[in-house]
Amino acid sequence: MAPKEADVNGVLFESDATTPDMALPTTPVQQADNYPKKLVWRNILLFAYLHLAALYGGYLFLFSAKWQTDIFAYILYIMSGLGITAGAHRLWAHKSYKAKWPLRLILVLFNTLAFQDSAIDWARDHRMHHKYSETDADPHNATRGFFFSHIGWLLVRKHPELKKKGKGLDVSDLYADPILRFQQKYYLLLMPLGCFILPTVIPVYLWNETWSNAFLVAALFRYAVILNVTWLVNSAAHKWGDRPYDKSIKPSENLSVALFALGEGFHNYHHTFPWDYKTAELGNNRLNFTTTFINFFAKIGWAYDMKTVSDEIIQNRVKRTGDGSHHLWGWGDKD
Ligand code: ST9
Ligand code: ZN
Ligand code: ZN
């Protein structure tokens, strides 16, 4: 499908997107920080415990765990990361490509290892993030500061404006997928198994790791790292970096984030052209392992209908709204 563009409040989107709710930003409304915030103490305590335990887990990763456990934790990092990037983000939130059921099954398994809530809930929040970007209806509204957009938004009840506007969001396509419905229905059984129990039991039984090393390294340390890398896209990549495609928005091209986030740090591009399955101007071999992963499945026919943006549309946009730094991000020859 050739990408077409229309201009809504100065931000381009694909006018024939099948689910418009994934891509249509609105004009920022009031930036009120003055509603009575309700702290969620359960989350505050659990995240405090997770981060303290993960710090110790990081120490064990370096100085105590068996090498097999470290490699296992790294593999889990990549698998759960792809469950977020290729699954929840590029496939389900944005529908930037289509996937046959075996790939959807792999992605939902990977996604469950990542414990970032069900893919349906994740995609629903993310559609709000794009549609109402940096307003009160954006779940991790970056205008409320680094801490709020990083982790703070998970420690308080959501803004009433989000709940109000969220009623109008179309997520029928997500509920139409039986694989996603299954994950959501059994999430409280599947998630502990995938994120904590199996990552602990496997190192103990397969290579005789200690219970504490297995739990603290392969489960908690790996989980906390991947959470923070994901959150950095909402915080750091909404604050620091160049804005070659649209200088009027906060999302930025952040190389350090992209390095750890499997290709998801080119956030100025992504907010400007949210339907591109690469979430960046450049794909393979340019710090974009998620694109390599999707392209591999496209080769065997399990991924298809990948949406992209033509060079001409990019160039026009760069000239019209970029901050002049595009020469740094075109990176010479394209893939
Ligand atoms: C986590 C998610 O960490 C991280 C997501 C990050 C996203 C990053 C995106 C960046 C791009 C991609 C880059 C990926 C890079 C990956 C790199 C990997 C290497 N729409 O939520 P509730 C309504 S999760 C429409 O309970 P509260 C709805 O009616 C971490 N409606 O609000 C809903 O009822 P229901 C683990 C919405 O009570 C009702 O409101 N998980 C929407 O205010 C209540 O919803 C946790 O820690 C919407 N979007 O509670 C749990 N939202 O659901 C964290 C709400 O029945 N969450 N409604 O339809 C919670 O505990 C709670 O949600 C809360 C808010 C306390 C934060
Ligand atoms: Zn997105
Ligand atoms: Zn964003």
Image (cartoon, rainbow, N blue to C red):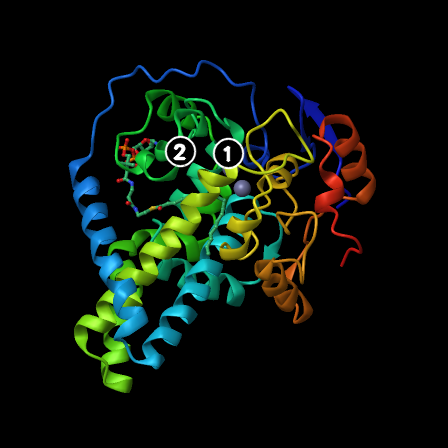
Q: Give the residue type at disc 1.
A: Lys
Residue to which mark 1 is pinned: 239
Ligand 2's quadrant:
top right
Q: Are marks 2 and 1 in contact (CB under 8 Å)?
A: yes
Q: Give the residue type at disc 2.
A: Phe
- Residue 47 to residue 145: above or below: below
Q: For mark 1, give the secondary structure.
A: loop
Residue 234 position in % (x across, y down): 45, 39
- Residue 27 to residue 298: above or below: above
- Residue lying at the far front of the rendered structure: 63
Q: Nearer the viewer, residue 2 or 260?
A: 260
Residue to which mark 2 is pinned: 146
- Residue 206 to residue 325: above or below: below
- Residue, x 51% and y 44% (percent of image)? 93
- Residue, x 40% and y 33% (percent of image)? 146
For the question of whether residue 190 can be seen, the reply is no
Quarter residue 319 falls in: top right
